[in-house]
Image (cartoon, rainbow, N blue to C red):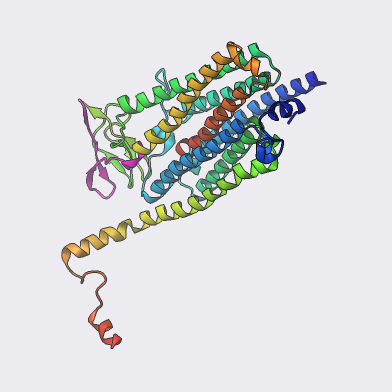
Amino acid sequence: MSADSVAHDTVEHGEGSWDGAGSPFKASYGKLMMWYFLLSDAFTFAGFLIAYGAIRFSMPTWPVPDFVFSTTPFGGHGLPLIFVTFMSFLLIISSVTMVRGVQEGHAENKNGVVFWMFLTIIGGAGFLGCQAWEWNNLIRTEHMSVTVNPFGTHIESGEYLEGDGHDIKAGDTFVAGDSYLIHQHDGHFAPLKYKTDAGVEKQQEFGPKSFGALFFFITGFHGFHVLSGVAFLIIIMLNVASGLYEKRKNGYEMVEKIGLYWHFVDLVWVFVFLVFYLL
Amino acid sequence: MAHQDKSEAIKGVYRGLVLLAVVTLIEVAFSLFGKGHLWEGAKGNVWITYLVGFALIAFSIYKAYFIIYEFMHMGHEVKGLRVSVLLPTLLLVWAIIAFFQEGGSWGDRRELIKAKDKIEQNEVQQPVGMLQEEQTKNLH
């Protein structure tokens, strides 16, 4: 603690630690509490992701991510994980522009902080836009919901007796472990009939029901963190521009705090990306 | 001097960007390899699935470490702050082991539960928990 700020405090408080003079861990109250909030938030996310893992372990089959997430905007098809990798890059880049903003804050460079925070906001909004497209594609085009999961997995090999007008034609063969998507026709799901190698006639079954609920809930919770992060970034950027933090002469500490939160959102995405898309 | 430090710090940030981007690309390549997209033979191989899984988890933990220590400046904080934030996350090690084992157990007992349902429907066996006649004799 610098000498003049101690002198400022001694008017009302003593100088000992019990009088509020020292900072525990040499960090400001706001930064320390942000760290502890992020710790608690990490436990919330960990609880969700561990629940996903436990349910996935309990299921005989589970939709494979490289099949479920293989479409991209502008008609991209059969491109596993490409779009979500792009989304990850958006978050990483916005994390880097946030670090630059904090650095300019330490240098008390107001315009620099506004510039880099603005780029960070663009990155966050871009990520949200990509997520909106991904959700829209899953809900409207592929008809997945929190209670219905049309992504199934074959548990035996066989041959299709009919086609769905998309990827599957009558006579196509499959082996155990192959994934399929049950398409809708005229607003109703139309599971395809097939004959197993043993000669039994069956039809496609839906995948584990909990997949949709877990996906929408966990990526939605993360997306809501991004959304509120963008809102806070906009508020703080406007405050920076108005010169509010310049007067405080504390190296734009508020920018540092929203920076911690923003990096945490990126950090959580590392694990959401791992659990939902990579494994 | 101060100017020199700042340009060094800025360079460090962009090095971090390249590092995170490269690690993410490696992760995606590993994941696609494990699913048999890069080499057909990898699909369904249990050893490859496990190895790729562990590699992906290791890469993700490295990314998390890098974000916390470099971008969030945890490396520059005092030890007490580092310990008080990072040590509690070790509780998650217990949670992961316990819940994954439990999840696996639900999966394993699926067939057992179905079998038990069949037995009760057919009323072949006495209700669970009742002692058989033989066992009752042994008690006296």
Does the magenta segment cover residue A192? yes
| For residue A98, above or below residue A56 | above
Residue at the extreme right:
B1
The N terminus of chain B lies in quadrant = top right
Q: Residue at x 40, y 46 (%)?
A: A56
Please state the horizontal and vertical placement of residue A94, each as a whole percent of the image: 57, 22
Q: Residue at x 40, y 23 (%)?
A: A132
Does the magenta segment cover residue A257? no
Which is nearer the eye, A229 or B37?
A229
Q: Is residue B39 visible?
A: no
Please state the horizontal and vertical placement of residue A269, each as a whole percent of the image: 51, 33
| For residue B85, above or below residue A2 | below
Residues in magenta, as a range: A187-212
Q: Is residue B131 left or right of residue B61?
A: left
In which image quadrant can residue A138 be found?
top left
The C terminus of chain B lies in quadrant = bottom left
Q: Residue at x 54, y 44 (%)?
A: B52
Residue at the extreme left:
B122
Q: Residue at x 63, y 26 (%)?
A: B17
Please state the horizontal and vertical placement of residue A173, each as a whole percent of the image: 32, 39
Residue at the extreme bottom:
B140
| For residue A74, above or below residue A41 | above
Which is nearer the eye, B136 or B21?
B136
- How many tags in the picture? 0
Please state the horizontal and vertical placement of residue A195, each as a whole percent of the image: 25, 43
